[in-house]
Image: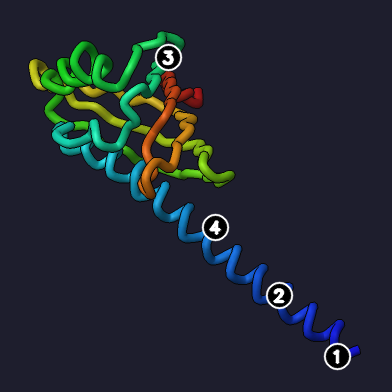
Amino acid sequence: MKLKLLFLGLAAIVAVKTQAQQSDEINKVKQVLESYKQAIESLDTTGTGNLFVSQSIVIESGKVEGRYQDYLANHLGPELHHFESFKFSDYEVAIEVALPFAFATETYKYTIVLSKDKSVIERKGVATSILKKENGQWKIWQTHSSARKPQTNH
């Protein structure tokens, strides 16, 4: 009987420790995604290359953009120069960790104000990302985002 209680106690300790480690990994993944989101909102992508593995894959609205460095140079970077502001709202994220990978699904709305004429673009978006833990750091390995105009109720 004492052996059973000891075994159950040890199993409970291991379960709690594993759950705490899982929660810690999820929080670290959230920090990476939040850093990327904040960079876009600030219209300043300086240092965001550090959030991605060197051979990352970026897919946006059905188009393979290539590595993050290519996406930044040929799409995102030039695009951000045309924005006065970019704001996310209604942001939610679900993360599953299966070391050395993490899988994230983000849902959000975003509002862009264009610099040239102050016109407003509103979209409802979703992104799925695979992150990989390399040398103790979580980095985005692949991300796929898409967006559409929000439905209006008539």
**First-in-chain label (4 vs 1):** 1
Instruction: Give the residue pinned by disc 1.
Output: 2
Instruction: Give the residue pinned by disc 2.
Output: 12
Q: Residues within 10 Å of mark 1 (few under 14, many from 20)?
A: few
Q: Is residue 46 above or below residue 16?
A: above
**Amino acid type of the residue tagged 4 in the rendering:** Gln
Q: Residues within 10 Å of mark 2 (few under 14, many from 20)?
A: few
**Pointers 1 and 2 in contact (C-beta within 8 Å):** no
Q: Quadrant of the N terminus?
A: bottom right
Residue mark closest to the camera, 4 vs 1: 1
**First-in-chain label (4 vs 2):** 2
**Amino acid type of the residue tagged 1 in the rendering:** Lys
Instruction: Give the residue pinned by disc 4.
Output: 22
**First-in-chain label (1 vs 2):** 1
Q: Is residue 4 above or below residue 124?
A: below
Cα separation between marks 4 and 2: 15 Å
Q: Residue furthest right?
A: 1
Q: Is residue 36 above or below residue 72?
A: below
Comparing 83 with 6, the one in front is: 6
Image location of residue 133, percent across then percent down: 43, 42
Q: Quadrant of residue 90?
A: top left
**First-in-chain label (4 vs 3):** 4
